[in-house]
Amino acid sequence: MTDLRLALKSEYFEAIRHGTKTEEYRLDNPYWQKRLVGRTFDRLVLTSGYPANGDCDRIMVLPWRGWVRQTITHPHFGEEPVAVFAILLTGDQVQLGKVDVAAALLNASFAASL
């Protein structure tokens, strides 16, 4: 199973948890192009920062829904419009036990090292 793991600031993690944030942005640059373009994932593993293994309150697992390219203006990226990958966050959270969460983090860490 292939997971995409994204570490988020706690404010964005909580907004996703509460359903007020439906897309997560990553700059459209060579780093993210290599990781996203032409690839598909089974799950999206979102973390609030870098939690310890088994810290289920700071880990959310969503089904992979894909991404779209957009141009946005956002304080995080500066005052000028920038091209981004908008990773879609719709869908119900996948309920996992502690063993499953540890496996999801391990798989995502391994995939990120490739």
Image (tube, helix red, strand yellow):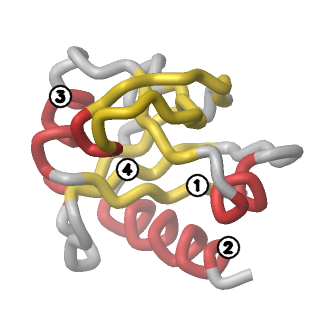
Residue under label 1, please give it.
4
Amino acid, disc 2:
Ala
Q: Is residue 79 above or below residue 19?
A: below
Question: Which disc, if any, is residue 111?
Answer: 2
First along the sequence among labels 1 and 2: 1
**From mark 1 to mark 2, how far is it between C-alphas?**
8 Å
> Callout 4: 10 Å neighbours few (<14), some, many (20+)?
many
Which of 98 and 13 lies nearest the eye of the viewer?
Answer: 13
Q: Can you give x and y, in whole percent of width and height, for residue 43 in the image?
A: 59, 44
Q: Is residue 110 above or below residue 54?
A: below
- In terms of image quadrants, where is residue 16? top left
First along the sequence among labels 3 and 1: 1
Amino acid, disc 3:
Ala
Residue at the outermost right position = 38
First along the sequence among labels 4 and 1: 1
Q: Can you give x and y, in whole percent of width and height, for residue 23 in the image?
A: 43, 25
Question: Marks 2 and 3: CB-CB under 8 Å?
Answer: no
Which of 1 and 32 lies nearest the eye of the viewer?
Answer: 32
Question: Which disc, if any, is residue 46?
Answer: 4
Residue under label 3, please give it.
15
Q: Can you give x and y, in whole percent of width and height, for residue 109 in the image?
A: 54, 77
Question: Marks 2 and 4: CB-CB under 8 Å?
Answer: no
Amino acid, disc 1:
Leu
